[in-house]
Image (spheres, rainbow, N blue to C red):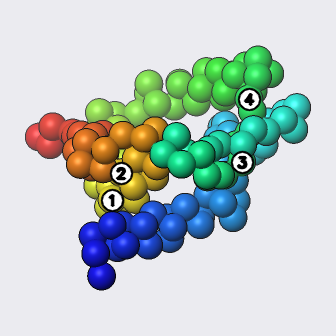
């Protein structure tokens, strides 16, 4: 099997998750559609194939996200540095664990080269571990 065939198979496995659930907003710890119900189709610039349907957020969704962030901030602010560090390292670990999936999906979504997106996905997890 060629590298291209392997990569296309991996990509299709990764994209199934988005195609099954679509991409929704994530506000206040909840996954939710746009308040208006509006969506748009996301197509790959590589071959214009349908990737998935995406919630089309608008001002109401932005306001809801800002309000959720404002409500969550006091707990984050008051949390000790050691606890915040644990949470941020856990997020970095999750990104590292899914770096290949992130790279493949971003490659198809943006048209960027896989070798570039692979490095970018790992940089996204970059945390100075002290």
Residue occupied by mark 2: 103
The residue under label 1 is 100
State yes or no: discs 1 and 2 in contact (Cβ < 8 Å).
yes
Element at label 3: strand
Identify the image quadrant of the N terminus. bottom left
Left or right of 1 in this view: 61: right
Instruction: Give the distance between the C-alpha atoms of the residues marked 3 and 1, in whole angstroms.
Output: 22 Å
In terms of secondary structure, where does tag 1 sit?
Answer: helix
Q: Residue at x 76, y 17 (%)?
A: 59
Please give the residue where the numbered disc 3 appears in the rendered image. 53
State if disc 3 and disc 4 touch (CB < 8 Å).
no
* Residue found at x 37% / y 72%: 5
Q: Label 4: few (<14), some or many (≥20) within 10 Å?
A: some
The tally of labels here is: 4
Q: Is residue 114 above or below residue 110?
A: below
Q: CA distance from mark 4 to mark 3?
A: 12 Å
Q: Earlier in the sequence, mark 2 or mark 3?
A: 3
Residue bearing the label numbered 4: 57
Q: Position of residue 87 (x, y in %)?
A: 36, 45
- Report helix, strand or loop for mark 4: loop
- Measured in 3D between alpha carbons, the distance from the residue under mark 2 to the one under mark 3, in whole angstroms, is 19 Å
- Lateral position of residue 130 relative to residue 33, left or right: left
Q: Earlier in the sequence, mark 4 or mark 1?
A: 4
């Amino acid at each position: 099997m060629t590298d291209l065939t392997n990569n296309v198979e991996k990509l299709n496995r990764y994209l199934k998750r988005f195609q099954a659930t679509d991409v929704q907003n994530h506000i206040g710890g909840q996954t939710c559609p746009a308040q208006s119900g509006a969506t748009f189709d996301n197509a790959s610039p590589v071959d214009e194939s349908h990737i998935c349907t995406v919630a089309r957020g608008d001002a109401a969704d932005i306001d809801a996200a800002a309000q959720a962030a404002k409500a969550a901030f006091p707990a984050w602010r008051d949390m000790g540095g050691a606890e915040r560090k644990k949470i941020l390292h856990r997020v970095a670990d999750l990104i590292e664990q899914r770096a290949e999936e992130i790279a493949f999906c971003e490659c198809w979504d943006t048209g960027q080269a896989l070798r570039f997106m692979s490095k970018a996905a790992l940089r996204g997890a970059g945390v100075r571990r002290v």
